[in-house]
Image (cartoon, rainbow, N blue to C red):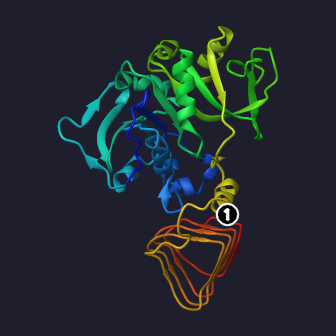
Amino acid sequence: MFAILLQACPVNQAYILGAGLGTRLRPLTDRLPKPLVPLFHRPLAWWAMDACSRVGIRRFAINTHHLPEAWSGLGMSETDGDPLMTGGNGLSSISRTWGDLDVTLFHEPVLLETGGGLKNITSWIGAEPMLVHNGDIFSSLPLEKLIAAHEASGLPVTLALRSEGEARHIALDPSMTRVTDIRGRLGLADGTHVFTGIYCVSPEFLGLLPEREKVSIIPAFLELAKQGRLGGIVLDEGVWLDLGNRQSYLEAHQMLDLGPRIHPLAVVEPGAVIKKSIIGPGAVIESGAVISNSVVWPQARIAGDARLDQCIVCSGMIVSGGHRQEDI
């Protein structure tokens, strides 16, 4: 299921951030958690895990909050032994396998934010470094370069950065290997680079995070930046897309070529017209329908009189009539 490199990897575990509410992607995220929103017929989390597995990572943690029951529909298998551990405040975790990867789901009844969620999995992390990957990111960045830079630096954290993008909040020192400021909060420098939402962290960093608190990761990053101990590496190779809103989600399906645009299990009746659109498995497109620049999720049904342009069909309703730039 997942491509694996056989050589040893100094980082063999990863944390996929999956607990966010995905408000910018509503109503898509009213039906699925953000990491399970399909990109070319596969959940965003699948693509993140596939990217990590290509550099040898075999062990994954994913935090959940919104619609946690949706994760049970992914074909994950429960592992042998004691699968469920419950902590304070209703926090719990359950171990699964996804294909040939080990996955532990950490449920957060109350959102802990990026820092609190990381602190919550301290015992799972153990004494080994880890890669962290936002759940709404698609990338083909050379993660092996991020891992190598982190290992060579000996720093607690190394951020993967891009030179181009809208949110240039990260300032770097002249060596381009140390982050000196974030959003100008230290008053030292304006940002020049984009934080990708992907980074490596060593266990010592967890000491900067408070126990059982809802807290962002940024204050701890800033503390390291003050000390000159927040690493960075610029990775401009490959593709990096933040799919956190509907426009970027639709654009990704136009820009990328990740597989068949019409799934083999979709039914497109003769006389239906499909233009630059993605049709998911089990979807039925009736004769006469015209679908342009749109994404149709699995099991959707599009009536013969439908005219869709720049739409996302994410509900189980039968869609008919004319729609433009709508989420249905």
- In the rendered view, tell whether residue 24 sits above or below residue 83: below
- The location of residue 294, given as percent across then percent down, is 64, 69
> How many residues crowd mark 1 within 10 Å: few (<14), some (14–19), many (20+)?
some
Q: Is 181 or 7 nearer to us in this picture?
A: 7
What residue sits 18% from the left and 41% below the top?
80
- The location of residue 315, given as percent across then percent down, is 52, 67
Q: Residue furthest top?
A: 227
Report the amino acid beneath label 1.
Gln
Location of the C terminus by quadrant is: bottom right
Q: With 282 as the anchor, is 104 left or right in this view?
A: left
- In the rendered view, tell whether residue 93 sits above or below residue 283: above
Callout 1: SS: helix
Quarter-of-image position of residue 7:
top left
What residue sits 60% from the left and 81% below the top?
320
Residue at which label 1 appears: 254
Location of the N terminus by quadrant is: bottom left
- In the rendered view, tell whether residue 201 sits above or below residue 16: above
- The location of residue 300, given as percent across then percent down, is 50, 73
- The location of residue 230, given as percent across then percent down, is 63, 17
Q: Residue furthest left?
A: 81
What residue sits 29% from the left and 39% below the top?
95
